[in-house]
């Protein structure tokens, strides 16, 4: 269940980030021979394992594991790193953001976190969950260090009564 929720959360995040579902229509390739992006990835993340590639509108997206962490890195055709997305369970959320989330969204727990790094800009997309009886409320929240969290999506899920 948690994996499917994480998959849905990642889908929502990618749609919000790209404005298009077509990123999932890209053809995955285990390697892009001769690509400058491959060389850049090997230079930027030499310990990357389980690397898969996809191409979307002239950009190359590498999905890989780096030090037991899931990462997506987007490169342009010249091999320049445009965006890095680090996917985690939220346990390593920056302290100041944890405090803001706990104040602004009491009763919610962080199910996952995606850290997005582009140049000097870092933002966090958090998937928050609150369950009351048979109703689960999911929030996708965007937060930045020193800023205020903003809800970018709100979903409701009805779950069956617990059998006892």
Image (spheres, rainbow, N blue to C red):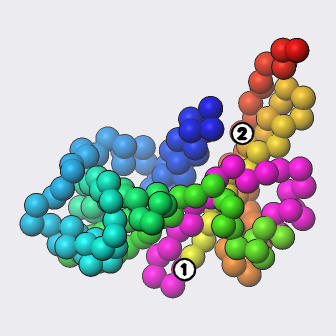
Q: Position of residue 32 (x, y in %)?
A: 16, 58
In what element is the residue under mark 1? Answer: strand
Q: Does residue 59 appear to the left or right of 66 in the view shown?
A: left
Q: Which residues are magenta?
A: 100-121
Residue at screen point 56% across, 38% down: 3
Q: Is residue 115 magenta?
A: yes
Q: CA distance from mark 1 to mark 2?
A: 27 Å
Q: Does residue 163 appear to the left or right of 91 in the view shown?
A: right
Q: Is any part of residue 15 visible from this angle?
A: yes
Residue 78 is drawn in which quadrant? bottom left
Residue at screen point 56% across, 66% down: 115
Q: Is residue 157 above or below residue 140?
A: above
> Are the residues flagged by discs 1 and 2 in contact, CB closer than 8 Å?
no
Q: Does residue 83 appear to the left or right of 142 in the view shown?
A: left
Label 1 or label 2, whichever comes before in sequence order: 1
Q: Is any part of residue 152 visible from this angle?
A: no
In what element is the residue under mark 2? Answer: strand
Q: Position of residue 95 (x, y in %)?
A: 76, 74
Q: Residue furthest top?
A: 163
Badge 1 is on which residue?
121
In the rendered view of the protein, which quadrant contains the C terminus? top right
Q: Position of residue 8 (x, y in %)?
A: 56, 40
Badge 2 is on which residue?
155
Q: Residue furthest bottom?
A: 120
Residue at screen point 21% across, 49% down: 29
């Amino acid at each position: 269940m948690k994996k499917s929720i994480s998959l849905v959360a990642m889908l929502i995040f990618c749609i919000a980030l790209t404005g298009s579902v077509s990123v999932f229509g890209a053809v995955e390739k285990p390697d892009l021979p001769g690509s400058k992006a491959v060389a850049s990835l090997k230079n930027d993340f030499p310990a990357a394992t389980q690397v898969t590639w996809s191409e979307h509108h002239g950009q190359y997206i590498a999905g890989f594991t780096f030090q037991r962490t899931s990462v997506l890195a987007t490169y342009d055709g010249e091999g320049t790193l445009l965006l890095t997305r680090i996917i985690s369970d939220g346990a390593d959320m920056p302290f100041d953001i944890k405090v803001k989330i706990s104040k602004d969204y009491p009763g919610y727990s962080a199910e996952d976190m995606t850290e997005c790094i582009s140049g000097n800009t870092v933002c966090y997309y958090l998937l928050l969950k609150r369950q009351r009886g048979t109703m689960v409320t999911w929030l996708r929240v965007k937060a930045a260090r020193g800023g205020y969290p903003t809800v970018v999506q709100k979903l409701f899920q009805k779950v069956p009564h617990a059998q006892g």
